[in-house]
Image (cartoon, rainbow, N blue to C red):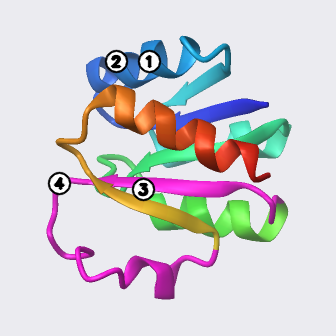
């Protein structure tokens, strides 16, 4: 199963990628909505890590596309905003499985990916 990382910051995406690859998972990185949707369209994605605050495009549009075209794909959101700290993201995104702070340790995020990927 392949993970899709949707993150505008290439350095942060690379950090997450290295940690997830340690579990033996294949990773595709997209830095914007268009590339992320293209990766989902190509298929084979089992889980997505997406920063809520994308610079080019919308993380919610990526999640909506995944929900419609790939309903088994789960979205693990990462955010530096406190806006969704009340859990309301689960009311807006049907395939959301988690929403964690951007300050979360990369190895914790990788462990969460493995946990949710095992459920798909």
From the viewer's perspective, is 75 left or right of 108?
right
Residue 45 position, x and y percent, is 76, 39
From the viewer's perspective, is 20 left or right of 104?
right
In the image, residue 43 sits, relative to residue 76, either above or below, namely above
The residue under the point 54% across, 76% down is 93
**Which of these two is toward me, 44 or 56?**
44
Q: Could you tell me what secondary structure mostly forms the magenta stretch?
A: loop
To which residue does mark 1 refer?
A: 19
Q: Are marks 4 and 1 in contact (CB under 8 Å)?
A: no
**Which of these two is toward me, 3 or 10?**
3
Q: Give residue 77's mark.
A: 3
Marks 1/2: CA distance?
A: 6 Å
Q: Are marks 1 and 2 in contact (CB under 8 Å)?
A: yes
**Which of these two is toward me, 119 or 29?**
119
Q: Earlier in the sequence, mark 3 or mark 2?
A: 2
The residue under the point 73% across, 55% down is 73
Q: Nearer the viewer, mark 1 or mark 2?
A: 1
Q: Earlier in the sequence, mark 1 or mark 3?
A: 1
Marks 4/1: CA distance?
A: 20 Å
Looking at the rendering, the stretch of residues picked out in magenta corresponds to 70-94
Q: Quadrant of residue 69?
A: bottom right
Q: Earlier in the sequence, mark 4 or mark 1?
A: 1
Residue 19 position, x and y percent, is 44, 18
Q: Secondary structure at mark 3?
A: strand
Q: Are marks 2 and 4 in contact (CB under 8 Å)?
A: no
Marks 3/2: CA distance?
A: 16 Å
To which residue does mark 4 refer?
A: 80
To which residue does mark 2 refer?
A: 15
The residue under the point 37% across, 47% down is 56
Q: Are marks 1 and 3 in contact (CB under 8 Å)?
A: no
């Amino acid at each position: 199963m392949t993970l899709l990382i949707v993150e505008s910051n290439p350095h942060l995406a690379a950090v997450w990628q290295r940690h997830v690859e340690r579990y033996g998972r294949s990773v595709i990185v997209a830095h914007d909505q268009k590339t992320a949707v293209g990766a989902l369209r190509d298929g084979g994605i089992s889980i997505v890590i997406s920063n809520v605050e994308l610079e080019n495009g919308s993380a919610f549009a990526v999640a909506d596309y995944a929900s419609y075209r790939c309903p088994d794909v789960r979205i693990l959101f990462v955010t530096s905003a406190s806006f969704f700290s009340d859990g309301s993201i689960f009311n807006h995104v049907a395939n959301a499985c988690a929403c964690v702070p951007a300050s979360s340790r990369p190895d914790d995020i990788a462990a969460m990916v493995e946990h949710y990927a095992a459920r798909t």
